Amino acid sequence: MAAPVYELRDDSAGPGGDPGSTGDRRTGAEGGVDPRAAGGKPPCVLLVEDDAAMRIICRLNLESEGFRVVEATDGKEALRLAQSEQPDVVLLDVMLPDLGGFEIASQLENIPVVFLSARASELDLQRGKQAGAIDYVTKPFDPIALPGRIREDLDELNRGGSAERVWQMRFGRSRR
């Protein structure tokens, strides 16, 4: 088996892959998430999780499926990285040491949020919907299936689906 080949890329390039570009880095030719879009940049996940073991599990599985992962361990760092990295999606724990996940989500604009939480009551799901999440993954979960689930969520958004549509795809109920 050949060793993987890693390419150096210029992360100072704009969203379209070229410096100063304004293209949409989130869609490929067919409208889905395409790791080759924007000069070969993979879709970026901002992983916000205070538990180190959970971060490692998520990061390894996401990276193995072609995602670029940026990590934050608390809410303030998450908000800073969301602004500087402009991720394609935020995978956000609900219970963090400083700011809560619902509070963080309400401050993120135009970035899809997928909650990752041990809190799985109907009230928690409702709070996730109200915070604008596109999905809500409850712990424990299958970490191997996580990248596929996130890719499906992003693909639906990129096909013109709304956050509401992605939520319905997952949970079969409206965001009311």
Image (spheres, grey):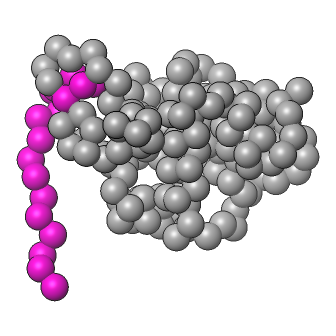
Magenta segment main secondary structure: loop
Choose between 42 and 100: the one closer to the eye.
42
Q: Image check: 94 left or right of 125?
A: left
Indicate whether 14 appears above or below 158.
Answer: above
Q: How many marks?
A: 0
* Farthest bottom residue in view: 1
Segment colored magenta: 1-17
Q: Residue at x 53, y 21 (%)?
A: 110
Residue 106 in the image: state x and y as whole percent.
Answer: 66, 22
Residue 159 visible in the snapshot: yes
Q: Quadrant of residue 19?
A: top left
Where's the N terminus, which quadrant? bottom left
Residue at the (90%, 46%) spot, across then down: 122
Q: Quadrant of residue 62?
A: bottom left
Residue 90 in the magenta stretch? The answer is no
In the rendered image, residue 13 lying in the magenta stretch gets the answer yes
Measured from the top left, where is residue 158 in percent x and y?
50, 33
Q: From the image, which quarter does the C terminus lie in?
A: top right
Residue 85 visible, this orientation: no
Please tell me which residue is depicted at 25% across the width and 45% down the height of the picture.
36
Q: Is residue 54 above or below residue 133?
A: below
Q: Is residue 92 left or right of residue 9?
A: right
